[in-house]
Amino acid sequence: MASIESMAANFRRLDQFARADTAMHRLDARAKVMATLAFIVVVASFDRYTVAALLPFFIFPIVLAALGKLPTAYVARNVAVAIPFALAIGLFNPLFDQQVLFKLGSIPISAGWISCLSIVVRAVLTLSAALILIGVTGFPAVCEALERLGMPKVLAMQMQFLYRYLFVLIEDTRRSARALELRSCGRSPRLPTVASLIGFLLLRTWQRADRIHMAMLARAYRGDFHSRKVGNFGSGEVAFVAGWLVLFGLLRVYDASQLLGALVGRALP
Amino acid sequence: MSHHLVELKRLGHVYPDGTAALSEVSLRITHGECVAVIGANGAGKSTLLLHLNGCLVASSGEVRVGDFPLTRATLPQIRRTVGMVFQDPDDQLFMPTVLDDVAFGPLNLGLPPAEAEERSRDALALVGAWHLRDKPPYLLSGGEKKRVAIATVLAMSPDILVLDEPTSGLDPFARRQLMALLKDFRHTRIIASHDLDLVMDLCERTVVLHDGRVAADGETRELFRDDALLAQCRLEKPFSMQGCPVCGVVRRIA
């Protein structure tokens, strides 16, 4: 139950960060969404044995988080949660791909280890970028931007509702879980009990969805979501997107890590 | 003025599982009236209210709002006329921020964004919640949620307000605030409530439902004096009509 509560608190914090007011927050959501999508595509486009060339890309999440005043510890903690999942995907690579690429001292490093590491680095890059995007924009604004960039309306609406009612569902779950715990007298609940609790949560959610739909119909809803906001995609937004696109292009073509290494190598005798 | 009229003619409703929630309910509520619908749990109050703007469809009988019978064709017009405030404000507040939520209705009516925002501002100011405009709904207190939910409906400038349990779950101060607000409205108001003191304060007329039928319909004070009726419908006198518990105890001791 503590984990449900901390999850809710964690979520609320992200929402709070999104309501701050920095230059990064004021930027039109579409610009940030476009830059982040480009970032994810470029990071994903690298060869599977790439590690070093990916590292310079950390500049994007770092700059965004710094300008948006997101606490590093918060981002790091939430991205760290996802690392085991990325590891699970790359876990078998060292077993299947045992060709030795190079030796670190006397330890042979196989291609599998490198591709596994590459997966983890990419996961950290893309996840932190997505998390920071939401942290400096707010989930509803991201949905709206995606919709205005061409995502189907229905999908955008579903995402909005998911976000809004996640908080209500978490509250609901927390209450049910607490009631269960109080009457379990310290014993861990049996599987059928938990199953029926989850079943009732589902049914209650269903009923609520019905009531929300009624409330929407009662307010003249006819299938279209209208937005109050008028977008403001000015020169600042164009410069933001163009600047990042150029940087991503350069980093994709030139391996900045290698160049830096060569420079340092030349400087040191 | 006739569009402020609500009329039910021998309304009946049977739920899909066979429960007859309403039968032979006939009512006529005229312009500017404030009418309470009271009754025990399961007497059919909420079911009745849901018929008033077509959320539920009558199994038998007829609902008329203004000059129109409630049909599929007149539904949009009727939903504009009848503003419904639901019992659980969490069902009613589904947009990311309070202002977005209040503007939802006016935008659906096809108003340009600037005007929708103006109307939303007026509605929020009226319920004293303008300062909450940028907050997400989950950060509001119970009383704030209720007031915002009422604003979402007011922003559509309805002629008739239907409220389901407006004061449930509110602290005494928030309840007083809300009652003062409702008292000032000039709309036709239909309020379902277990808060019988609220009914005494706000509504001149009361309809008592019992097992899906109208058990009584008349002047509020008259009805609350009828002990036999109240007992039969599992109701009690409002506290304001009962003796003072403190004075009573003191007198007995003396």
Image: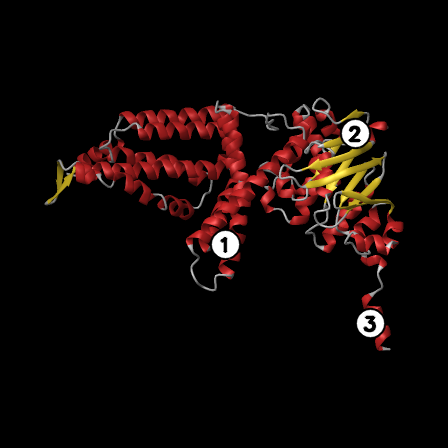
- Residue A231, image x and y in percent? 56, 25
In the image, B72 versus A108, the foreground residue is B72
Q: CA distance from mark 2 to mark 1?
A: 45 Å
Res A168 label: none
Identify the subunit bearing mark 3: B
Local crowd size for mark 2, using a 10 Å CA cut-off: few (<14), some (14–19), many (≥20): many
Asked whether, in this view, residue A248 is left or right of residue A182, the answer is left
Identify the subunit bearing mark 2: B
Q: Mark 3 = which residue?
A: B249
Q: CA distance from mark 3 to mark 2?
A: 50 Å
Taking the image as drawn, is residue A37 in sight? yes
Q: Amino acid at mark 1?
A: Ala
Quarter of the image containing the N terminus of chain B?
A: top right
Q: Mark 1 = which residue?
A: A177
Label 3 residue SS: helix
Give the residue displayed 52% in from the left and 38% down from the top. Answer: A163
Q: In the orientation shown, which residue stands out farthest toward the front?
A: B18
- Residue B12, image x and y in percent? 74, 36
Q: Mark 2 = which residue?
A: B65
Q: Amino acid at mark 3?
A: Val
Q: In the orientation shown, which residue stands out farthest toward the bottom?
A: B254
Label 2 residue SS: strand
Q: Does label 1 lie on the same chain as label 2?
A: no
Q: CA distance from mark 1 to mark 3?
A: 43 Å
Q: Amino acid at mark 2?
A: Val
Asked whether, in this view, residue B21 is left or right of residue A5, the answer is right
Taking the image as drawn, is residue A26 in sight? no
